[in-house]
Image: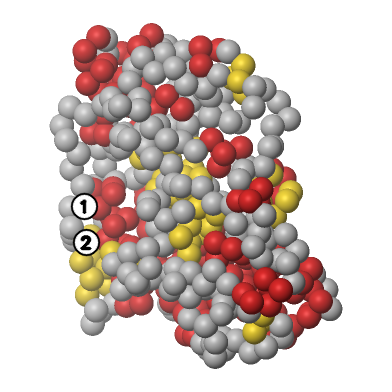
Amino acid sequence: MPSVTHDDAPPLADLMPWSVAPPRLGRRWPAAPDAASLKARWDALLKAEGPDREALFEPTRSRTLHSAVGQLPGRPSGTGRLIRATGPAPEPVGVLLAPFDEQWLLPDHRLIDAARPELWRVADERQIFVVESPTGTGGPHLLATSRIPLLRPGRIRPLYRRPGGAEPNLAPGLPEHLGARYGHSPAAPDVLAWIMAAVRPDLTVPLTGDAELFARGVELGRRLLWLMRRDGDRPKLPGGRRPYVRAPLPARPLTIRYDRDEETLLLDEGRISPVPPEAWDFETAGVRVLEQWFDARTAEPEPGTLAAIRPATWPQAWTSELLELITVLALLAEVRPLQAELTVTAPVTASELHRAGVLPAPESARRPASVLDHHEEGPEGQFALI
């Protein structure tokens, strides 16, 4: 991470003042690595009756089959009590369930203990969600995604407070203050790119008044954002370094191992290579990303539960996702030494921002913006007025 000659770097929490606690599902079965299983689970739930439906649902204090809750913002799911629910499953949406693990979710408020509607209200194609990682555990200190993040325990900081890329979640006056140094006010995505490149393990962010250094950091941060979000051109390693399936993966692999000498990933007798050691060793919160991703798709669920409804064999799509994940981790590992070389000069300190009135951010900037331009359906079809 960047080196600094001072200890007065502003905290991320001051630079991006609005944050939201991560959603809490309360039950694992509404999320899965494939969308088809979710629809099958929903059908199995609705076919069950009485105590069987209740047991399959896995009730908690926050959600039971009798809970009355409104729709998730922007998601046309039912609002009647699940005890008498009928009809098809809501269309699954992509979420970030674990670091670098994009899965699917049934976006129905009745299935989720704490959905954080304020996140769903600002989720669109322009939004970038920044997720704090536990400090001192290795790996990136911040993750970024275009999908609703379900990771715990770090807080979530959306880049924008309103849909359509409106009202950046930055301390009011920050871009203008930096712009006085650079000769132009940086756009919100560029400020975020700098944050991604420069953030330190304690989640402070050294800022610079040097326009050329800022531009270099933004370039690094843009690459980090592109690799983490994966919502544009698909990342590729140069020819000769791209991972391929060298021996077919079995119908249901049970183990994952790594041969460091051969740079080969082994899924039972299946073989993928070349896999750089940096990709295999890539960790978040002390856990290897590739192992965690594999375990999420192969761990045996409890028999008789909805989570036990899953693909009978390993889908081809998972192989493609695995090859891309290996590529992303390898490319991210290449950015780390460049971040370490980002030595901050001409610092813009927290004290300077306080003197300029940029900090502290007003309390209103730490609360959700009022974003509704339409009614949201509340419990039992009532309209929620917010």
Regarding mark 1 in the picture, which secondary structure is present there? loop
Give the camera-side residue of 349 and 234. Answer: 349
Residue tagged by mark 2? 256
Mark 1 to mark 2 CA distance (whole Å): 8 Å
Do tag 1 and tag 2 residues touch (Cβ < 8 Å)? yes
Q: Residue 328, percent across and down?
A: 46, 67
Regarding mark 2 in the picture, which secondary structure is present there? strand
Q: Which residue is drawn at 29% across and 57% down?
A: 292
Report the amino acid beneath label 2.
Answer: Ile
For residue 326, which quarter of the picture? bottom left
State whether residue 245 appears in this view: no
Q: Which residue is drawn at 21% across and 13% down?
A: 51
Q: Residue 357, percent across and down?
A: 73, 67
Q: Nearer the viewer, mark 1 or mark 2?
A: 2
Q: Residue 197, percent across and down?
A: 56, 74
Report the amino acid beneath label 1.
Answer: Pro
- Tell whether 253 sits left or right of 356: left
Does 293 sit above or below residue 113?
below
State whether residue 299 appears in this view: yes
Residue tagged by mark 1? 253
